[in-house]
Image (spheres, grey):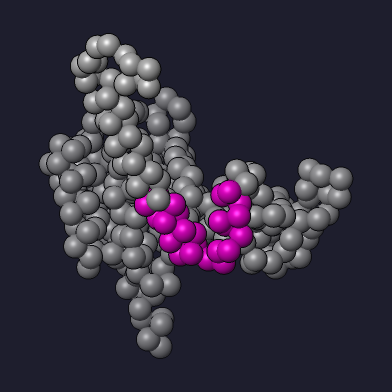
Amino acid sequence: MYVIVFQHLVNAMTKYYLEWIIELRKVYPGIEFFGQDDKAKIPVGDSIHVGTGVRPGNLKVLAPVNESNPSSAGDHDFHIGSIIPSVTLRCHIPEKIGGSFFVGDEETGTGQIFVTLRDAVFDPSNVFDHCAQLIDIVKKQGWKPTVLVLQTDGGPDHSLKRVAVEFALIAMFKELDLDHLVILRGAPNGSARNKIERCMSILNIAAAHTSLKRGQMAKWAERKLSTCNSMAAVRTEAATVDELRSKAVIKVREIEEKIAEAEAAPVVQGPVNASGE
C-alpha cells in the first residue's frame, strides 16, 4: 500500500514539473532542460581482457578478444581499473506533456547526448566534474540559457544535502550567468521517470558483448601495481611515487644550484708549483 501511494506521488510530481517546463517555454524561450548521471562502471582488465558485462537480460555470452584465442575474455570481477561514462542529456521541450523529450537533430541541438569517460582510479566522478562538464558543453555549443533546469538522481555526487554540491551549483549558476537555476532530484524507485536514464540503453550498444584490457605500462610501474589489490591501494602507491619524485626533483635542483654557484665563482690564477698547487 505504501509503495503504491509513494509511486503515485512520484508520478504526480514528475508530471507537474514537466508541465511547468513546457508552459514556461511557451512564454520564455531562454529555458533549457538537462539531465545528468553516471552510467555503471565498465570494468577494464589488468593482465587479461574482462567482459564489460553488458548483455541482453541475464544471458551469459562470450565476449570476443582480438587475439589468437578469441574467447579468452574473463567474466569475473578480478580487476582494479574501471571506466566511468559521465552522461549529459539536453532534453527537447515539447509543446504538450505527451510529446517526446528526446527527439532532436543537429540544427536544434536538442536530444543530444554528451559523454565524458573518466578513470575510476585517479579521476572519480564528483559534482564539480559534473558542473564543469555542463558548463563546457553549454559554452562550446554557444547556448545562452537564462533559466536552467537540471534533473539528477540525487546520488552522493548530486545530493543537495551536501555542502560541496551546493557550492558547485552556485559556482555553475554564476559562471553561466543564469537568472534562475532549478535542480530536480529523482525519487527512490522513480528512475524510470528520470530522463537521463531513458537514453542509457543507447550507450549499451557500443559496450555490448565486448571486453577491455588496459595498456602495458613501464616495468617499474607494473611491479608497483602487482602489489595492489584495490583502487585505494593504487592511489596510495601513486601518492608514494609522487612523494619520492618530488624529493628527487628537490635534490636535483640543489645539485644544479651548487654547480651554477661553482661555475659563477671567480677563477684564481697564479703560479703552479711542481705539486700542481
Name the outermost residue toward the front: 274
Check the picture and name the quadrant holding the N terminus: bottom left
Q: Nearer the viewer, residue 253 or 102?
A: 253
Residue plotted at (76% across, 65% down): 60
Question: Which is the main secondary structure of the residues drawn in magenta?
Answer: helix
Which residue in the rendered view is the most extreme toward the bottom?
A: 1
* Residue 185 among magenta residues: no
What residue is drawn where x is 35% and y is 69%?
Answer: 187
Image coordinates of residue 110 in percent, x first then y, are 40, 36
Question: Residue 266's quadrant in the figure?
Answer: top left
Which of the 4 image quarters holds residue 5? bottom left
| Front in this rendered view, residue 250 or 150 | 250
**Left or right relative to 129: residue 52:** right
Instruction: Point out residue 26 in the picture as x, y percentages from the top left corner.
Output: 24, 39
Image quadrant holding the C terminus, namely top left
Where does the image place residue 225, in percent across and percent down from the top left? 57, 57
Locate residue 16 relative to residue 69 in the image: left or right: left
Whether residue 37 is visible here, answered yes or no, is: no
Is residue 177 among what the camera can see? yes
Nearest the eye: 231 or 163? 231
Q: Which residues are magenta?
A: 220-243
Quarter of the image for residue 53 reads: bottom right
Point out residue 160 in the picture as x, y percentages from the top left corner. 23, 63
Residue at x-position 48% and y-position 45%:
117
Question: Is residue 223 found inside the magenta-colored segment of the image?
Answer: yes
Relative placement, left or right, of 38 versus 212 is left
